[in-house]
Amino acid sequence: MSKVAPELHSLLNAQINNEMTASYNYLAMSAWFENTPYGGFAQWMLAQSQEETTHAMKFYHFLIDRGAKVELAAISTPRADFSSPLEVFETSLNQEEQVTTSIHQLYNMAEMHRDHESKNLLNWFLDEQVEEEKAVQDMIDRLRLVGDNPLGLLQLDQEAAQRSPLIDTTTHEGN
Ligand code: MG
């Protein structure tokens, strides 16, 4: 028996899709960077993509734990072409702001239904969104600062490479 109100249930299912869409969009950004000299940014975006999948899985398991049905929906084709690293990170910030808005809508709905367990889950996401937006905004600020300077761009690329993906997907061998 589901312990989640129907309206909240459908928003939680939609959030699985929002997070998986974000994951897929970041994967497309990573793929775009792979065909540029910026391998570090490609790695950053791959790590980000994997993180978004773990976000989707938090909602997935929450629904299961609360006895509510998981309903997966189609994911749209991600944007594949960008003009510069700055444009990719600006697109990323825009996406994170949309995700934050959807978390706010979920939180409002959880409050309306006095669903304390959902609010507890969503509190984690509120903190996470503050961190995500800050990390992307910091990179945007520094990309704007270096402009077209190749040395500056490569320096930022190296910094981005410090972030490692959760799972190594680079091997072609089986497990
Ligand atoms: Mg997320």
Image (cartoon, helix red, strand yellow):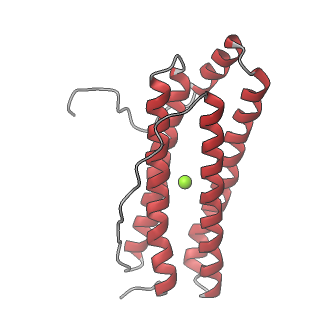
Residue 2 position in % (x across, y down): 39, 85
Quarter of the figure with residue 27: top left
In the displayed structure image, the side of residue 129 where residue 60 appears, left or right: left
Residue 57 position in % (x across, y down): 42, 59
Residue 62 position in % (x across, y down): 44, 70
Q: How many marks?
A: 0
In the displayed structure image, the side of residue 90 where residue 28 appears, left or right: left
Quarter of the figure with residue 146: top right
Image quadrant containing the N terminus: bottom left
From the viewer's side, name the closer residue of 62 and 85: 85
Residue 150 against residue 104 in the figure, above or below: above
Image point (35%, 72%), residue name: 70
Residue 13 appears in the picture as rendered: yes
Residue 136 position in % (x across, y down): 67, 40
User: What is the residue that sits farthest to the left in this orientation?
Assistant: 174
Ligand 1 sits in quadrant:
bottom right
Image point (50%, 51%), residue name: 22
Residue 159 against residue 56 in the figure, above or below: above
Image point (66%, 61%), residue name: 126
From the viewer's side, name the closer residue of 91 and 81: 81
User: What is the residue that sits farthest to the top in this orientation?
Assistant: 151
From the viewer's side, name the closer residue of 121 and 69: 69
Image point (43%, 31%), residue name: 31
In the displayed structure image, the side of residue 141 where residue 18 appears, left or right: left
Residue 54 appears in the picture as rendered: no
Residue 101 against residue 114 in the figure, above or below: above
Image quadrant containing the C terminus: top left
From the viewer's side, name the closer residue of 48 and 94: 94
